[in-house]
Image (cartoon, grey):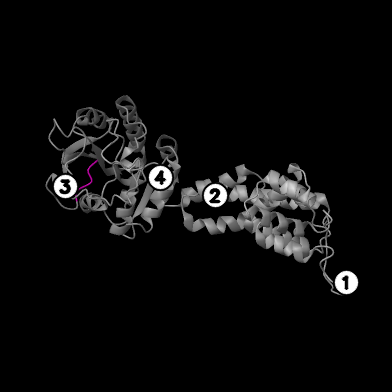
Amino acid sequence: MLPINKLSFDWLDIIKRLRNEGLIQKEIGEKIGWTRTKIADFNRIIESIVADVLDLCKKHQIGRVTQNVAIATFDFSEGWFRNSGLYDLNEKYQLKCIQRFIQDKCKWKKAILQRETKKYKNWQEFIEIAKEKLVNEDKLEKLIELIENNCFTTKEQLIDKINSLNKESKNKLIFGDALEELPKIDNASIDLVIIDPPYGADYSSNWSEDSEFISKNGIKNDGLEEALDLLDKTLSILKEKTKANSHFYIFTSWENSPLFREIVSKYLDIKNIIVWHKKAGGGLGDLQYTWGSYYELIIFATKGNKPLNKRKGDVIQVSNEVNKITKIHPTQKPTDLIRELLEVSFQSGDTVCDCFMGSGSTIKATREYDERANYIGIEEDKVLFEKAKAFIFGGK
């Protein structure tokens, strides 16, 4: 029988092998004469400590290094791992911590070790906050450098720094609620608003037999009263955030267009109702008793007197054929459609805002239309936000 403490790595290898053979925890314990609790403790090392760290520890384990080699050794027991704090760290910081421990000749007392792992754990948490709240990813690397230099002792200090960086940034992709995030934008800083808010149609589609098909998902705030209230509150804020002369494009449906127009007219001057003819698709819904729906409406409104770049007709013909495999959002708009709007209203250097970012079509189209464009995109669904970012910066 192998001694339990001194050669814990041999036991780890044995337990790994038995696990790979398909034995469960109880069966492993019966085979090697250990309690289930003891097996569970060693399983946690296997599952929580990365292989590179275990390899380093094994090389420096007491009893494994010849006496005439000048190398620091230590008794890396199961209890040491359990009390170290390493379980809470990711691969990067586990490795960083154990390298420092060995560099200091494995002489750290328990309190020093736990202080170090707590420090790395704090860095991890701070970096996650930075990734979530920083709107310009180009500044993330520098912010992580500040975190790892212990420049922030509290979360509040970090958030203050993030808010400062966000205020400086012209290009913003923000995860959060539009009604909470829009007030943080500088007043009179937006030139062009293109939004596709919930229509109040309680949208979902049962067209596909695939239960995971994107169009089977409902849309948040898509009840009529919720949608109207959201539009009203959003435009109230956007009126302050847009410049004195600015343009608005607001997507809507024929059913609720009159109600949308009533709200929009409270804050802006409605100039046109633009018809987007989708060319193909025919729409879904009642396939037996209604005509197919080949169009959607876009309310064009202005604040002040910003002139058009060029005058187009109020019917836009752009195919709605978005790749069904890569489709991100059930009502995703094609970037070619957004480009039609940009050609009329965008001027070089303008800031474009889409506070219901969804798939990210507006932001992607803006970036592709003019590399000098500034943009603000807001989305409250975390999964959708991450998918939209991937689409904006590379997807088709």
Q: CA distance from mark 1 to mark 3?
A: 79 Å
What is the three-letter code of the residue carrying label 2?
Ala
Of 21 and 40, which appears nearest the observer? 21
Among the two numbered marks 1 and 3 on one chain, the one whose residue lies closer to the N terminus? 1
Residue bearing mark 4: 384
Based on the picture, tell me whether residue 307 belongs to the magenta stretch. yes
Q: Residues within 10 Å of mark 4 (few under 14, many from 20)?
A: some
Residue 283 image offset from top left, x and y in percent: 19, 40
Left or right of residue 37: residue 62: right
Among the two numbered marks 3 and 2 on one chain, the one whose residue lies closer to the N terminus? 2
Among the two numbered marks 4 and 1 on one chain, the one whose residue lies closer to the N terminus? 1
Residue 285, located in which quarter of the rendered image? top left
Residue bearing mark 2: 130
Residue bearing mark 3: 280
**Segment colored magenta:** 304-308
Based on the picture, tell me whether residue 96 belongs to the magenta stretch. no
Residue 382, located in which quarter of the rendered image? top left
Residue 314, located in which quarter of the rendered image? top left
